[in-house]
Image: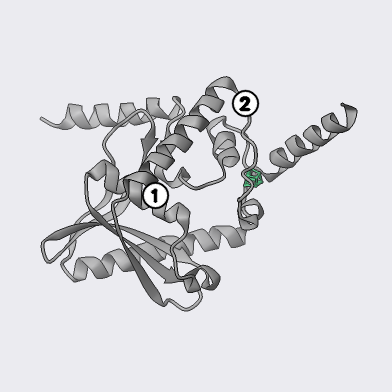
Amino acid sequence: MIKELIEEFYKQKKSDKEKNVFYVSDAGKCPRAVWFSLKGYPKKELDARTLRVLEHGDYTHMRIIGALFSLGLVNAVEVEIPNNDLVHGRADAIISIKGEPYVVEIKSVNSAKFKKEKPDPAHVKQLQLYLYFFKMKKGILIYENKDTQELKEFVLDYDEETVREVFSEFNKLKELLEKNVIPDIPKELEDWRCDYCPYIEECEKIEEEKLNQNVRN
Ligand code: SF4
């Protein structure tokens, strides 16, 4: 009865991969890195330490989701957003507290990020996209400090302006992908993004070429 629908769902996902479809987690990332990824540029291999950091993040998710289940708050986990031509993604969980539904996003962050009073703008953008696609009013960003396991939460209301901003960024990037034009590096890009970027070599090559071109002109 639903077998065909499920088969179709997976076929659709596969073909979307070839159509420059973004992920919710691309919101707030370096647009040039997203561009390289969708163009299929080779990625620098992740070192063992980075792999361990990523694995640690996965365990954090599992532990917190487990706690939410034990509290009887979880309605669904790993919830896919409705199919569309621009963006894909899966929210960590949808929970209910006193009958009110919330989208939950869990992030494992370092002490410096944990100490900040406001959440990372990229995380806010991601949560807002989930709220938009699920037509929900409230979301919770849960931060776990990866150095101390302390927890912190930010409860956010749906914000249409942020959603509009993300759609505009995605649409601009889609245009550059279609025209095969490499995006500029955003002026406000945080340095740590380049430290962890798997496309740093390609990116540096492009910047070097630009520099040489300017010298020649
Ligand atoms: S190295 Fe930095 S600027 Fe270049 S693609 Fe990666 S994140 Fe963006």
Vertical side of 209 occupied by 151: above or below: below
Number of numbered tags placed on the structure image: 2
Q: Amino acid at mark 1?
A: Gln
- Residue 60 place in picture, x, y as percent: 39, 66
Q: Which residue is mark 1?
A: 126
Tell me if I can see residue 146 in this picture.
no
Vertical side of 98 occupied by 170: above or below: above
- Residue 32 place in picture, x, y as percent: 60, 38
The C terminus - image quarter: top right
Question: Toward which corner of the image does residue 66 lie, by quadrant?
Answer: bottom left
Q: Determine the secondary structure under disc 1.
A: helix
Tell me if I can see residue 73 in this picture.
yes
The N terminus - image quarter: top left
Tell whether circle 1 marks a residue whose Cβ is less than 8 angstroms from ligand 1: no
Residue 88 placement, left or right of 208? left
The label number, if any, that marks residue 181 in the structure image: 2
Q: Please report the residue visible at 21 percent of the width from the left and 65 percent of the height from the top.
A: 69
Q: Quadrant of ligand 1?
A: top right
Tell whether circle 2 marks a residue whose Cβ is less than 8 angstroms from ligand 1: no
Q: Residue furthest right?
A: 216
Q: Please report the residue visible at 62 percent of the width from the left and 54 percent of the height from the top.
A: 196
Q: Residues within 10 Å of mark 1 (few under 14, many from 20)?
A: many
* Front residue of 173 and 19: 173
- Residue 9 place in picture, x, y as percent: 27, 31
Q: CA distance from mark 2 to mark 1?
A: 25 Å
Q: Residue furthest top?
A: 179
Residue 25 placement, left or right of 82? right
Q: Please report the residue visible at 39 percent of the width from the left and 31 percent of the height from the top.
A: 86
- Residue 188 place in picture, x, y as percent: 61, 51
Question: Toward which corner of the image does residue 164 lie, by quadrant?
Answer: top left
